Image (tube, helix red, strand yellow):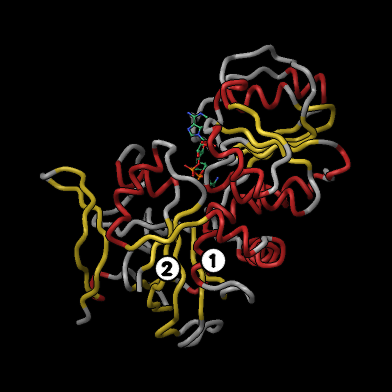
Amino acid sequence: MTVFEAIRIDKDEAGYRAGYGTMSDADLMPGDVDIDVTHSTINFKDGLAVTGKAPIVRRFPMIPGVDFAGRVTASTHKDFAPGDLVVAGGCGIGETHLGGWAQKARLSGDWLVHLPQGLSPAQAMAIGTAGLTAMLCVLTLERFGLTPQQGTVVVTGASGGVGSVAVALLARVGWRVAAVTGRPEEAEYLKSLGAAEIIDRAELSAPGKPLQSQRFAAGVDTVGSVTLANVLSQTQFDGAVAACGNARGMDLPASVAPFILRGVSLLGVEAVRPRLAQRREAWARLARDLDKEKIDRMSQTIPISETLNRARSIVDGKVRGRLVVEIA
Ligand code: NDP
């Protein structure tokens, strides 16, 4: 029996708690690929899981961490062999299936993607589910038919993980990007990622009129609630907003006016289901389009011993960009 280090969440008579501990390979859940995890990351959802602020974790004990990268050590899956470098994320990992904040993982090869060429495992985790979601938002806007020639794209929650990657990606493909942030001190950081304009989060925070001045051709919203309602009200004729997050709230106190009077579309984006073809496409685009120097600028590497504290602070909106957790 192999014992390995893991962060675990338990829930029993003693309550709901996250801590550092050990598990053994006998604890691992069914799967046809075994992996030595080298890197993981902290997503907003991991913060919710660690703090118990939302019912993310569906079995106990749980190893949190919705993403990881590592090297295959054993496989009976046709697409993977020992030595392969792989990336996993979503698919219930860290929610219903043991996650990435541990030295070992076992899961279905149907949830895995080979590490894209040109990315290191650490860079893949600097991207993580947050970056994948940002890419899916960009692909969604592109499939809708929007192009940079149509005007400005707005990104809310811009200093966060999804927001940072979205700003960098959209700027890279030619959009004029307006970055919405509540942290004015991050203006230079956002400009270095490619933002052309910084909008104070407060401008979009209070309930506004159903139709407001048309400022944006497109949007990526990570925040939800009143902020998303205002973004919709400020989107121009035939524009669209890709909504992927709820950092401010799950509610959407909006009217139908932007939809029925300006032809605005609200496009939902989720990065949880496997949908391997879409994942592969998104990872390939990320490896191609995301400037490696910007990946390094937006990410910080931390040891596993700091993971729980930083996971708690992401829920308070205090993390800039992306955190990479070094496991190996
Ligand atoms: P982060 O915590 O890294 O970023 C969220 C950002 O939102 C913050 O940095 C902050 O940006 C802004 N924000 C926080 N609180 C508020 C508030 N009260 N009002 C307005 N803005 C606020 O999280 P991620 O980027 O990792 O995730 C963003 C959202 O996307 C989360 O809700 C997450 O659950 C969701 N998500 C959804 C996925 C899906 O499959 N649909 C996958 C991945 C993430 P700033 O300081 O710049 O204002």
Q: Quadrant of residue 108?
A: bottom left
Q: Where in the figure is residue 5, as x and y percent of width and height?
A: 24, 69
Q: Residue 39, which numbered label?
A: 2
- Foreground: 16 or 213? 213
Q: Where in the figure is residue 95, as x and y percent of width and height?
A: 38, 53
Q: Distance between the Cα atoms at labels 1 and 2?
A: 9 Å
Instruction: Classify 10 Å Cα crowding around label 1: few (below 14), some (14-19), many (20 and above).
Output: many
Q: Where in the figure is residue 186, as x and y percent of width and height?
A: 55, 39
- Foreground: 109 or 317? 317
User: Looking at the image, which residue is at 49% across and 87% down?
Assistant: 81
Answer yes or no: disc 2 within 8 Å of ligand 1: no
Answer yes or no: disc 1 within 8 Å of ligand 1: no
Give left or right: position of 99 versus 272: left
Q: Quadrant of residue 280?
A: bottom right
From what the image shows, is residue 232 above or below residue 43?
A: above
Q: Is mark 2 on a helix, strand or loop?
A: strand
The kind of residue on which mark 2 rests is: His
From what the image shows, is residue 231 above or below residue 57?
A: above
From what the image shows, is residue 182 above or below residue 130?
A: above
User: Looking at the image, which residue is at 77% across and 31% down?
Assistant: 216
Asked if the residues shown at circle 1 and circle 2 are in contact, with their CB atoms under 8 angstroms apart, the answer is yes
Q: Mark 1 points at which residue?
A: 124
Q: Where in the figure is residue 116, as x and y percent of width and height?
A: 61, 73
**Disc on the earlier residue, 1 or 2:** 2
From what the image shows, is residue 101 above or below residue 80?
A: above
- Foreground: 272 or 224? 224
Please count the marks in the image: 2
Q: Residue furthest bottom?
A: 82
